[in-house]
Image: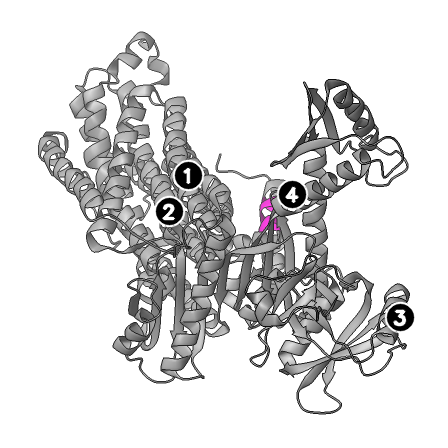
């Protein structure tokens, strides 16, 4: 007896749920945008610049002592937190401003000097045998470039997906797909703003992967809708969409399950470095699965792709063939 | 389409065997594997710095400084020419201003200006004989009595490029002299240099070695004015107050023009101070330097001179006797590491362009080892979970998917080795993700077969149609993922790029294994067994 996570021949009426789903999604998107602008993202060193140092001691680290010692250096208020285990501490400071009128080079040198000062302070507080597990120094030149590159990459990715869907399907399909995509990206940014999870370059990589994954799910549903539109010319659009979602439901669900089967161990055992990245991925898989069923398809109904198929009526021989 | 010709079967099998062959070196001890004959592939996946520990340092060469130095020299040439030092009449000028890439000056009349344009034009004509002068250094133009000398863009580009190349050479010498383990030094873009040094090298020392100018000069001591008066502002022309790293004498007044410069030093090394404690730096001059140094010390016994590194006095000894051997030593309170560093700086010569560290990422070997362990555990757990899950859902077909998944990981590892790719922690995450997503194609196919079976088709036809109809969705789904990976690669700072590479290769290998390999198994099964009903 085989395990069937989704029963055979489901006939859930997704289309009539679309108003509810729309309201739910709209609220979530508005909340995410609000969180993005009110709370802001907790940018990591890649985008914000500055210094991040992870130090490991033999004994549990007294976080408050470290905070006091680093605060005394006068680099503004440092972030000091446990990193993975009590023996390990992560210290981060924001990008330091050079004195007024300083040149760009001095601005870079100031970050370097700050990194050295913090390492000395940590040695003084935790003892000479403290090990520096990671030292990252990002100056203003590089952080500025990474911000631009990150934003550009996400925009280009979304644009290329739009073009691809347009090319493979038809523009009304790309409206639905892109709405789902933007929905996923916005909700991911929102969850990072709400929980103030560090947002670094690897999160951009995760978002790009989510873009690909969400598209992947949407495309499978759309592919079936297109096939059924040709096959059942007399059915209403709503019925065709419903039928297509139900037919692909098992696949949509199963793929999410196998992807999560691989991702959850990575979240649990992958260590502190990958945690934010894996979190983003898991969230993206869940949101992406939801959006391909509840966002992309309903938007497609609103855009009504029927017209695109009408002029090609005389093709009964091709009805059952693959698209 | 369920039938495969024998040739096709061989090709498929050969691909997988090749993948395994290229993947295997990564899982075997290096020594015993390297001893095998040369036909066996030996390239391995390189571990990224985040896995093996090490420092990534991004430097920017300040080519603007080099160009403005050149422009200052050019201004000197112009002055010399117009004052008639190279022969020719003296032309009076005023208001000489040095801008970003041009020098302008006002002559007394338009006729003078015209003459100046003519003479300066000759001065900056490209010299065919000279090796590096293939481009014209500057163009001369006139507006009324004002003459402007502008560096040509080609000259600026060539000069900047040469300065960066020479800087790379200099830091390569320095790193080699330190004996750091296999560092890679790569130029990035116009003025950037990436240095990656694996292992637990002290990153602060490495940064200092990389970014110090290393300009060594010997200066004459200026005794005409006491130091406190000089500090109060009464510095004689041609002299300058230098800082010294010494509590007893923090400042010292020296003649600004050096007696001898670092390029006249032939070799330098560190060693134990032969009298007194600490370490010292031994150096030897070339013949020009040795002659100059011998004459100077002979004529100035009892006086002082100073050895200056990057405008900081490191030693200011009194000359006891004439030093004619062409070698000398710098003593001071140096630690062994410090003495070694200074010796390397002197030996390798000054950096042609100042270098600035703009990005540093250092990972300790401990964290790297933790990451490898964490990555491996998650990979194995995720892999096993998917391997168990597939047969639970799809029975016999799930096993086919499992076989494809194993082949996929082998092909992925083989491709990464073949490309000599660098495996980073996000790269491992990419493999994990590939494992989760690779079975997607099989899920698509198997679900489609189930549908066909429900519609009452026979086993063979259901399998055949399932594969056929699922193809378009599989292709679309993988192309979208590939597009993301492609963009990520170009966004790519190191670790993210590693993720993009594994994801992109994983997409390609997974389409092959999930669509082609499972079809060989599934097709073989239904065609041979001709089951009445499929357990799916």
Q: Which residue matches tag 4?
A: B68
Compute the Cα span from label 2 to label 3.
Answer: 65 Å
Of badges 1 and 3, the one in the foreground is: 3
Mark 2 nearby-residue class (10 Å; few <14, some 14–19, many ≥20): many
Q: Nearer the viewer, residue A302 or A89?
A: A89
* Magenta extent: B9-17
Dot 1 corresponds to which residue? A153
Left or right, residue A49 beside residue A78: right
Chain holding disc 3: B
Q: Does the residue at mark 1 contact the one at mark 3 (Cβ under 8 Å)? A: no
- Percent coordinates x, y for residue B138 in the rendering: 73, 31
Q: Within the image, what quadrant is residue A63 found in?
A: bottom left
Q: Kindly identify which numbered label has been placed on residue B295.
A: 3
Q: Earlier in the sequence, mark 3 or mark 4?
A: 4
Name the secondary structure under disc 1.
helix
Mark 1–mark 2 CB contact (< 8 Å): yes
Up-down relation of residue B525 to residue B422 (above or below): above
Distance, label 2 to label 4, CA atoms, is 39 Å
Q: Secondary structure at mark 2?
A: helix
Q: Earlier in the sequence, mark 1 or mark 2?
A: 1
Residue at which label 2 appears = A204
Dominant secondary structure (helix, strand or loop) of the stretch shown in magenta:
helix
Residue B505 falls inside the magenta stretch? no
Confirm whether residue B114 shows in the render.
yes
Closer to the camera in the image, B141 or B515: B141
User: Which is closer to the viewer, label 2 or label 3?
Assistant: 3
The residue positioned 68% from the left and 46% from the top of the image is B69
């Amino acid at each position: 007896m085989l395990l069937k996570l989704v029963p055979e021949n489901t006939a859930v009426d997704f289309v009539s749920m679309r108003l509810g789903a729309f309201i739910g999604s709209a609220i979530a998107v508005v909340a995410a945008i609000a969180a993005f602008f009110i709370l802001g993202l907790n940018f990591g060193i890649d985008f914000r610049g500055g210094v991040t140092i992870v130090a490991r001691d033999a004994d549990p680290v007294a976080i408050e002592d470290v905070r006091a010692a680093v605060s005394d250096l006068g680099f503004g208020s440092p972030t000091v937190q446990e990193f993975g285990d009590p023996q390990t501490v992560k210290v981060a400071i924001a990008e330091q401003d050079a004195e007024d009128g300083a040149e760009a080079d001095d601005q870079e040198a100031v970050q370097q000097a700050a990194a050295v000062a913090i390492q000395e302070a940590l040695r003084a507080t935790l003892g000479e045998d403290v090990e520096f597990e990671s030292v990252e120094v990002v100056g203003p030149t590089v952080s500025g470039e990474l911000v631009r590159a990150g934003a550009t990459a996400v925009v280009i990715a979304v644009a290329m997906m739009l073009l691809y869907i347009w090319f493979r399907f038809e523009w009304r399909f790309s409206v639905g797909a892109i709405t789902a995509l933007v929905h996923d990206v916005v909700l991911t940014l929102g969850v990072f703003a709400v929980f103030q999870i560090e947002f670094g370059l690897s999160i951009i990589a995760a978002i790009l992967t989510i873009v690909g994954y969400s598209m992947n799910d949407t495309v499978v549903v759309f592919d079936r809708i297109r096939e059924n539109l040709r096959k059942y010319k007399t059915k209403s659009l709503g019925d065709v969409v419903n039928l297509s979602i139900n037919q692909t439901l098992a696949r949509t669900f199963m793929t999410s399950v196998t992807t999560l089967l691989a991702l959850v161990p990575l979240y649990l055992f992958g260590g502190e470095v990958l945690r934010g990245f894996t979190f983003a991925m898991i969230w993206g898989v869940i949101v992406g699965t939801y959006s391909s069923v509840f966002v992309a398809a309903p938007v497609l109904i609103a855009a009504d792709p029927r017209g695109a198929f009408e002029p090609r009526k005389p093709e009964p021989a091709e009805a059952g063939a693959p698209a | 389409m369920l039938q495969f010709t024998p040739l096709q079967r061989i090709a498929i099998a050969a691909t997988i065997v090749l993948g395994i062959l290229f993947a295997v070196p990564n899982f075997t001890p290096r020594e015993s594997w390297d001893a095998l004959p040369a036909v066996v592939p030996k390239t391995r996946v390189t571990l990224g710095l985040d896995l093996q520990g090490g420092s990534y340092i991004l430097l920017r060469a300040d080519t603007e400084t080099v160009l403005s130095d050149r422009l200052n020299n050019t201004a000197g040439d112009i002055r010399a020419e117009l004052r008639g030092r190279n022969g020719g009449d003296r032309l009076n000028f005023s208001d000489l201003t040095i801008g970003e890439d041009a020098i302008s000056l006002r002559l007394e009349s338009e006729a003078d200006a015209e003459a100046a344009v003519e003479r300066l034009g000759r001065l900056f004509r490209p010299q065919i004989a000279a090796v590096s002068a293939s481009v014209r250094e500057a163009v001369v133009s006139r507006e009324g009595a004002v003459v402007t000398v502008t560096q040509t863009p080609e000259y600026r580009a060539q000069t900047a490029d040469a300065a960066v190349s020479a800087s790379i050479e200099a830091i390569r010498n320095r790193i080699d002299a330190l004996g750091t383990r296999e560092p890679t030094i790569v130029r990035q873009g116009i003025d950037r240099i990436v240095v990656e040094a694996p292992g637990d090298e002290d990153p602060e020392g490495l940064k200092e070695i990389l970014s110090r100018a290393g300009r060594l000069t010997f200066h004459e001591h200026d005794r005409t004015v006491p130091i406190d008066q000089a500090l109060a502002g009464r510095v004689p022309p041609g002299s300058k107050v230098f800082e010294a790293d010494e509590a007893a004498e923090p400042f010292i007044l020296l003649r600004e023009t050096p007696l001898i410069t670092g390029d006249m030093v032939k070799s330098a090394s560190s060693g134990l101070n032969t009298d007194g404690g600490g370490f010292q730096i031994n150096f030897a001059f070339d013949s020009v330097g040795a002659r100059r140094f011998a004459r100077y010390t002979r004529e100035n016994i009892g006086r002082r001179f100073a050895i200056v590194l990057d405008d900081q006095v490191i030693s200011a000894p009194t000359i006891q006797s004439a030093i004619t051997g062409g070698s000398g030593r710098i003593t001071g309170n140096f630690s062994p590491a410090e003495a070694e560093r200074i010796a390397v700086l002197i030996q390798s010569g000054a950096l042609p362009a100042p270098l600035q560290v703009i990005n540093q990422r250092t990972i300790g070997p401990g964290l790297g080892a933790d990451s490898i362990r964490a990555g491996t555990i998650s990979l194995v757990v995720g892999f096993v979970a998917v391997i168990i899950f597939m047969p639970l859902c799809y029975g016999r077909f799930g096993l086919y998917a499992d076989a494809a998944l194993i082949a996929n990981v082998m092909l992925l590892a083989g491709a990464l080795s073949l490309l000599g790719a660098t495996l980073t922690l996000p790269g491992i995450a990419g493999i994990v993700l590939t494992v989760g997503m690779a079975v997607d194609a099989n899920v698509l196919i198997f679900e489609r077969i189930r549908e066909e079976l429900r519609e009452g088709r026979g086993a063979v036809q259901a399998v055949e149609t399932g594969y056929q109809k699922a193809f378009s969705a599989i292709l679309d789904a993988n192309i979208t993922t590939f597009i993301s990976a492609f963009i990520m690669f170009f966004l790519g700072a190191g670790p993210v790029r590693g993720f993009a590479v594994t994801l992109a290769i994983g997409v390609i290998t997974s389409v092959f294994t999930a669509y082609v390999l499972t079809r060989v198994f599934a097709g073989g099964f239904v065609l041979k067994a001709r089951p009445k009903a499929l357990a799916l």
